[in-house]
Image (cartoon, helix red, strand yellow):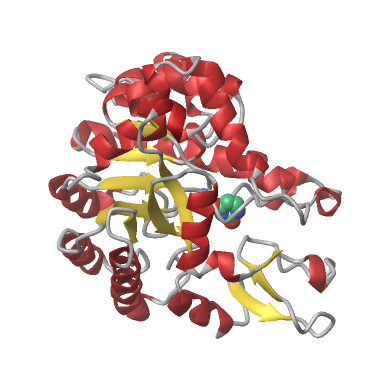
């Protein structure tokens, strides 16, 4: 699909960066997450971020992933955008954000990262915007202050967040001041997985399967469970204008929404506790508070996302710099083209394709201001 045919902005809302200051932080660490050059391959750095990627039974040269300039050099992001006809990107710090920092360091680190990312965007006016990072290991007051400060940074359009919250997940009522501040600021929460599922579910042969099980299934199920917990704890009943953009087309939420509703309806404990009275239904929240990215690589998943939330709430993304082609001589990324192709197939290149590819992002995230 080419821009010249459709005449529209193409906007990538799911695209990550580890700014140089964050890479320095990872280089200074000895436990996950960290960046290191191992003795058996001293010339190549590896990025070790996911839980368990550090397993000593894995040879050091296949631990994590090689980290090159595409992870931290904004020029490479711009070259990737040009290569794939992307006009604007809303960049976000990649996982695991600042989740691992001691409380005393998190506030300063968030301010530094957010200023750095805002500055990076300022180098490419009109092309780059960003989701900020919150100091989630700090106290709620420090987090709320950073939410408020983000509103004063020109290129920030919301926050990226994992599923751990303040340490006890997103159904923790201690997060209420944070939800209130984000809702009041009118910021979008980009909810993104990192922790996956307990490694036992992948079985004793997990090492034979690379990253496939944690990335293809652990990530989406983590997102689905986190959002279901928000729903069950009434976050959207208390914060009716809280907007959340779900990574990877909502994990499996569009596909499982009916089952979630049915389980709520048939649950004796909820009936007795009265917690299902006057609650908002998942279908309502999917069409009012939730936005979905279109990073699902096939028309089947994309079809479920459209059916659940509508084409006006679906936004194109790439997940760059993750999922590069493994072949050395390939310039266009298969992962990006799979998302472009799914959009073309589901919408038959009608007006809704333009909306998903860019118009929705411009409207929802105010990228023309
Ligand atoms: N792997 C990650 O760790 N993060 C992403 O966003 C994608 C793949
Ligand atoms: Zn991502």
| Residue 279 in view (yes/no) | yes
The number of numbered badges drawn on the structure is: 0
Residue 282 appears anywhere in the view = no
Is residue 169 placed above or below 136 in the rendered structure?
A: above
Q: Nearer the viewer, residue 217 or 72?
A: 72
- Residue 12 located left or right of residue 40: left
Q: Position of residue 33 (x, y in %)?
A: 58, 71
Work out whether 149 lies above or below 313: below
Location of residue 59 by image quarter: bottom right
Residue at image coords 40%, 39%: 10
**Residue 46 sits in quarter:** bottom right
> Is 102 located above or below residue 329 in the figure?
below
Q: Residue 257 or 303: which is nearer the viewer?
A: 303
Image side of residue 116 versus residue 192, left or right: left
In the rendered structure, the answer to whether residue 9 lies left or right of residue 214 reads left
Relative to residue 173, is residue 330 drawn left or right?
A: right
Which sits in the foreground, 260 or 109? 109
Q: Provide residue 52's location: percent of width, then percent of height.
A: 69, 62
- Image position, residue 339 (x, y; %): 56, 33
Which residue shows up at 37% across the image and 68% down it?
137
Q: Residue furthest front?
A: 4
> Foreground residue, 272 or 80?
80
Q: Position of residue 164 (x, y in %)?
A: 44, 54
* Residue 301 figure quarter: top right
Instruction: Please say if 237 is above or below 213.
Output: above
């Amino acid at each position: 699909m080419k821009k010249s045919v459709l005449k529209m902005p193409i906007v990538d809302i799911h695209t990550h960066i580890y700014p140089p200051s964050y890479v320095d932080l990872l280089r200074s660490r000895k436990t996950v997450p960290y960046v290191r050059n191992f003795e058996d391959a001293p010339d190549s750095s590896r990025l070790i971020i996911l839980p368990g990627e550090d397993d000593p039974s894995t040879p050091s040269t296949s631990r994590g992933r090689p980290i090159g300039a595409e992870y931290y050099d904004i020029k490479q992001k711009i070259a990737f955008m040009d290569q794939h006809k992307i006009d604007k990107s809303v960049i976000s710090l990649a996982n695991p954000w600042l989740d691992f920092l001691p409380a005393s360091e998190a506030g300063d680190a968030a301010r530094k990262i957010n200023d750095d990312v805002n500055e990076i965007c300022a180098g490419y006016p009109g092309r780059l915007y960003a989701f900020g990072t919150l100091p989630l290991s700090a106290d709620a007051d420090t987090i709320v202050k950073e939410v408020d400060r983000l509103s004063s940074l020109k290129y920030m359009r919301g926050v990226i967040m994992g599923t751990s919250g303040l340490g006890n997940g997103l159904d923790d009522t201690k997060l209420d001041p944070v939800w209130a501040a984000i809702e009041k600021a009118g910021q979008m929460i980009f909810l993104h997985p990192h922790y996956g599922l307990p490694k036992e579910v992948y079985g004793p042969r997990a090492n034979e399967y690379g990253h496939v099980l944690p990335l293809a299934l652990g990530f989406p199920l983590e997102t689905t469970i986190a959002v279901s917990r928000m729903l069950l704890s009434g976050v959207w009943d208390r914060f009716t204008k809280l907007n959340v953009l779900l990574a990877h087309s909502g994990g499996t939420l569009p596909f499982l929404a009916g089952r979630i509703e049915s389980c709520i309806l048939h649950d004796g404990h909820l009936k007795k506790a009265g917690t299902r009275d006057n609650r908002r239904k998942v279908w309502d929240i999917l069409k009012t508070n939730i936005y979905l990215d279109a990073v699902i690589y096939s028309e089947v998943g994309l079809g479920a996302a459209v059916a659940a939330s509508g084409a006006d709430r679906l936004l194109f993304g790439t997940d760059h710099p993750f999922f590069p082609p493994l072949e050395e001589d390939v310039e266009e990324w298969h992962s990006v083209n799979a998302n472009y192709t799914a959009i073309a197939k589901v919408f038959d290149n009608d007006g809704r394709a333009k909306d998903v590819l860019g118009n929705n992002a411009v409207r929802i995230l105010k990228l023309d201001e």
